[in-house]
Amino acid sequence: MFQEILAFILSTSGWVLVSSTLPTDYWKVSSIDGTVITTATFWSNLWKMCVTDSTGVSNCKDFPSLLALDGLSLSEMYGVMCSFRRVFKTCT
């Protein structure tokens, strides 16, 4: 009975953590400081990539699918999937 309660608590806390991190916009953030007037901030998450300039204007591009991610993100995603699949020995 104790193991079932512990498993339920762990799975519920996992769902809460996943639900709180997926809608977060700022997964990757970088900024470019040019001259005194011009600066830009690039930020992206799993769903879109945006650029905000010094005037506060944002330009966002939605990813049509997970396959539209850049190469580094695809390799990171493959690494995460393989780390979970190694338990079942299905990753090469």
Image (tube, helix red, strand yellow):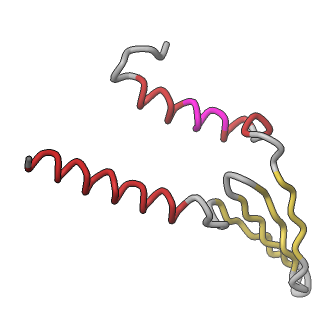
Q: Nearer the viewer, residue 7 or 50?
A: 7
Magenta span covers which residues?
74-78
Where, by quadrant of the figure, is residue 3 drawn?
top left
In the displayed structure, would residue 63 be above or below residue 87? below
Q: Write the residue at 73% across / 53% down.
A: 47
Q: Is 61 part of what is drawn in magenta?
A: no
Q: Residue 22 location, x and y as percent?
A: 58, 58
Front residue of 36/56: it is: 56
Report how many numbered discs are placed on residues in the image.
Answer: 0
Q: At 90% across and 68% down in the image, what residue appears? A: 59
Q: Residue furthest front?
A: 1
> Is 1 positioned to the left or the right of 31 in the image?
left
Could you tell me what secondary structure mostly forms the magenta stretch? helix
- x then y, percent, for residue 65: 78, 40
In the picture, residue 77 is in which quadrant? Answer: top right
Identified at 81% across, 64% down, the residue is: 50
